[in-house]
Amino acid sequence: MQTTPCSLRPFRLRPRDVLRVGGSGLRYRPLRAVLSALGLAIGIAAMTAVVGISSSSRTALDRELAALGTNLLTVGPGTDHGTGQKQELPETAPAMIRRVGPVQSVAAVGRLPRAAVYRNEYIPTALSGSIAVYAATQGLPEALRVPLVVGHWPNATQARLPVVVLGADTANTLGIHELRAASAAEGPNGVQVVLGGKRFTVVGVLAPSPLAPQLDRAALVGWGAARAELGFDGHPTTVYTRVRDDAVLDVHGVLAPTANPEHPEQVAVSRPSDALVARNASERAFTGLLLGLGSVALLVGGIGVANTMVISVLERRSEIGLRRALGATQGQIRLQFLAESLLLAALGGVAGVLLGTAVTGVFATTRGWPTTVPVWASAGGVAATLAIGGLAGLYPSVRAARMSPTEALAGT
C-alpha cells in the first residue's frame, strides 16, 4: 500500500494571537517598556499640547471677536507728510461721521496731556502713575462694548459736572479698592480723586477694553466738564465708529474725507479687531517653532524604541530559536517583533495624547479659555507614533526573522 507524504503547513496566527505574542515582551520587561514609551509620550504630549493651546487660543479669540464685534473703526489724527508732525482732527469730526448712512454709533475721546490724576493732594507730583486723562462723549461704553464693573456712565447733565470714570487699571493703581466692593447700582458713593488740580467724584469703573487698551489706564471725564474745568480745546483724539457689518469696507474708505474734508490725508483710519487677529497670527508662528521641537522629541523617542527592540532581539535569541525549531516561519517571527514595536509605540502615543490634553486643559483653564484639542491632533499623534514604531521595529524584526534555529539556539 503506497502512502502519500503529507505536506506540513505552518499554523496561521490570528490577530488575537499576534497581539498576545507581541505583548509578551512588554509584560516580561515592564520597566523597559515604560521607559521606552516615555520618550514617545513626551514628544506626542508636547505636540498635542502645542496644538491644543493654539486651538484654545483661537477659540477664545473667536468668542472675543464675536462679543466685541469686528465692525468697529477708529479715526485718529495722522501725520503731515511734509513736516512729519502729528495733526489734529477737526472738532466737527464726530458729528460729520455720524451723518454717514451705515454708521450705527459714534463716540469720541480727546486727550488732555497737561492733566494728571492723583489719589489725593498729598501724592508727590512725580508719582502720577502714568495715567492718561481723556474727555469722552456719551455712548463710549456702548461703542466699545465695554461694561462698567461698578457705578454708571455720566448722563448728559453729569457730563458737565466734575465727575470721572476710571479705567480698569487706573482704579487699581490709585488703590481705590472700595470701588470693587460697591454695588453696581449704588456706585462708589463719595470717592474722589484729584484730577488737573481739582477734585472729581468717581462715578464708575470700566471693565478691561480689548479694543481700546489705552483706556484701561485712563481717567475719563465728560466733554463739557473737560472744557469748563480742564481747558479742553474740543479736538478729539480718537473717534470710535460702529458700522453695519456689511458696510465696514465701504465706510472705511470714506471716513478720512468725512472726518477732515480739507485734508483727508492727515487722518488715520484703523480697525482694532485686526490687531487681535495679528496677535493670534504671531502666536501661530511661535506654535510652528514649538511643533518643530516636539517633532525632535518624537524622533528621539523613536530612536529609543528602535534601540529597545534591537536589545530585545539579542536577549531573546533562545526564544526565537525555539519558535523556529517548532515550525514558526520567518514571517511569523517578523510579525511578532513588529507587533511588539507597534504596541510599544501605541502605549506611548495614547499616553502622550492624554498628557498633552491634560496640559492643554490646565493651561486653558488658568487663562480662562475654552479647552479645545482638535480630533485630528489626537488621532494624528497616535498615527505618528505608530508610524515611528513601525519604522523603529522594522530592522529588529527582520534581523530576528533571519536567524536560523541552530544559530539562535547556539547563542544561548
Image: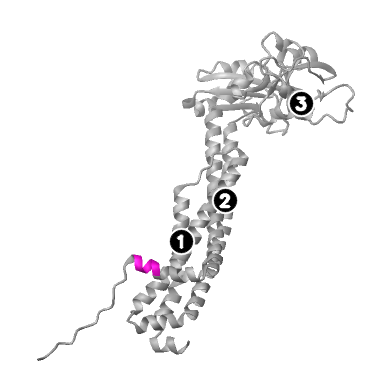
The magenta region covers 16-20
Q: Find residue 85 and report its horizontal and vertical position in percent.
A: 73, 31
Q: Looking at the rendering, which quadrant does residue 210 occupy?
A: top right
| Residue extending furthest toward the left | 1
Residue holding disc 1: 346
The amino acid sitting under disc 3 is His
How far apart, in angstroms, are the residues tagged by discs 1 and 3? Answer: 54 Å
Give the foreground label among 2 and 1.
Answer: 1
In front: 118, or 396?
396
Q: Which mark is residue 287?
A: 2
Q: Residue at x 73, y 26 (%)?
A: 218
Q: Is residue 121 above or below residue 291?
A: above
Label 1 crowd (10 A; few <14 / some 14-19 / many >=20): many
First-in-chain label (2 vs 1): 2
Q: Looking at the rendering, which quadrant does residue 166 occupy?
A: top right
How far apart, in angstroms, are the residues tagged by discs 3 and 2? Answer: 39 Å
Q: Is residue 149 above or below residue 396?
A: above
The type of colouring in the image is one colour
SS assignment at label 2: helix
Magenta segment main secondary structure: helix
